[in-house]
Image (cartoon, rainbow, N blue to C red):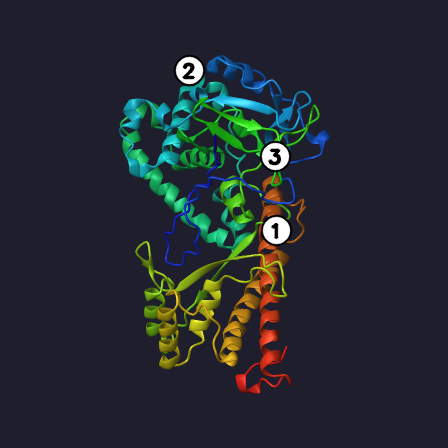
Amino acid sequence: MLLAPRIPIPRWSQLPISTLSRRLHAKLKFSSSSQTKLPVVCENALQPLEDDCNEFLPWLERKAGVEISSSLSIGKSAYGRSLIASRSIQTGECILKVPFNVQISPENLPPEVRNLLGNEVGNLAKLAVLILHEQKMGQDSEWSPYICCLPQPGELHSTIFWSENELNMIRQSSVYQETISQKCQIKKKFLESKLALERFPDIFASINFERFMHAYAIVGSRAWGSIKGLSLIPFADFLNHDGLSESVVLSDEHKQLSEVIADRDYAPGEEVLIRYGKFPNSTLLLDFGFTLPHNIHDQVQIQISLPPDDPLREMKLDLMQKHCMPAGKPVNGFNSLEDSFTIKEVKSALGKGKGLPQSLRAFSRVLCCSSTQELHALAKEAAQCDGRLARRPFETRGREILAHQLLLSQITHFIEEHESSIELLGPADSSSRGGNFVRRSQMARDLLTGELRVLKSAYRWLKNYIGILITADCPNNDVSNYGIIPM
């Protein structure tokens, strides 16, 4: 039995100023995403099933030739379609089984279309083309009842659909640049697919980039990794996300099906939830179009530049590259002048547990070097150890303090920028704008507030670390020799 992971849209780094450091997501485990259940709403917010989905489950069971679920029905909450308990459900009970034969993969494309879409197009794009193909067929599509239940234009809230004014709300977050980069890559996939689709003008003549991007986002937010590869799993993909749930989608090759086991008891009418993964709000917003008010997996990407007027700049760049610190290395053919680091929330300012990433602290040590002798010493130390550069504290405590003071200054700057951006958001319930603006403004607030919390935790850790060094080196707090202002 294998986990069937929900696959976020892959990241690509395209631009010289790209802030991306996240790699392709193909997670094979689900885990807690938050202390708050995202799509959970009060029970009276659940709405009756829409008419167009009344026959969905019976249709799917007829198509599969087996019962898929006797305990779930389709409802609608404030977050869209959902699955609710139609009877009492007990912990450990299998609540749905979706056979592989009613799961949708690129293999369901007409052979003449599939053969023209090369491997470089990718399975996400192929599934997007499949959705467009079935939409074009309308009621003649064998998947029509499922296609009709997919989100319509305007119902998705990934940042790739935000206007420039809306994106400006999150300009201080790496999600801003990731959104631009992702739209560029989706456009590339569209153009690659279009070359093949032009061979079938009767089916794809009316397909434009906006429609392709919508289909692509549907796949990116709903597809699951399985033994079949990348697949859409009808009915199962109506399950919403709960960061604390232990329920996941499992794929069983022997039984040729995917299933979900309840992790707790449910009363009739309760929304049944699973978890998607350990995703920060940056991933949830860009890939799934929602955020959590308090996401324990929030993180922030920061960029620290190597000063262009640093007299040792070339030597530092060469040293970092030799020791696998990619500052200044070309990224997808572009010369980056920044290095990107991902910071997670530092749980203890007292130095217990994990602090800041060692790679970030090493970077700051290299930056503060002011002589070739210091750089040679770092290189020698790395060669004598495990090859990683500047991972040990400086022997001279003053240099270690300066390196972390430099980092503290950068973190302080990022904190100020985030605080300013949050203040500019204004009231979250502004009635002067449309519903989408209100919702997206709240998402921006959740994103920036989570990143700010992470930054402040890093600030506290750094202040505490520097304070310990100062106290140990200068009992009288006389740090004038270091050019440091006592805290």
Lateral position of residue 99 relative to residue 71, left or right: left
* Residue, disc 3: 79
SS at mark 1 in the image: helix
**CA gap, disc 1 to disc 2?**
44 Å
Q: Nearer the viewer, residue 208 or 281?
A: 281
Q: Residue at x 39, y 74 (%)?
A: 378
Disc 3 + disc 1, Cβ < 8 Å: no
**CA gap, disc 2 to disc 3?**
29 Å
What's the amino acid at mark 3?
Tyr
Residue 131 figure quarter: top left
Q: Nearer the viewer, residue 386 or 413?
A: 386
Could you say where residue 86 lies in the image, as x and y percent from the top left? 66, 21
Q: Which mark is residue 363?
A: none
Going from the N terminus, do you reach mark 1 or mark 2 first?
Answer: 2
SS at mark 2 in the image: helix
Lateral position of residue 484 relative to residue 179, left or right: right
Q: Which mark is residue 140?
A: 2
Could you say where residue 209 lies in the image, as x and y percent from the top left? 39, 37
Q: Residues within 10 Å of mark 2 (few under 14, many from 20)?
A: few
Q: Residues within 10 Å of mark 3 (few under 14, many from 20)?
A: some
Examine the rendered structure and indicate whether residue 126 appears above or below residue 359. above
Q: Residue at x 39, y 48 (%)?
A: 12
Could you say where residue 223 lies in the image, as x and y percent from the top left? 46, 33
Q: Is residue 420 visible?
A: no
Q: Nearer the viewer, residue 210 or 274?
A: 274
Q: Quadrant of the C terminus?
A: bottom right
* Residue, disc 1: 445
Q: Residues within 10 Å of mark 1 (few under 14, many from 20)?
A: many
Lateral position of residue 301 relative to residue 373, left or right: right
What's the amino acid at mark 2?
Asp
Going from the N terminus, do you reach mark 3 or mark 1 first?
Answer: 3
Q: Nearer the viewer, residue 118 or 86?
A: 86
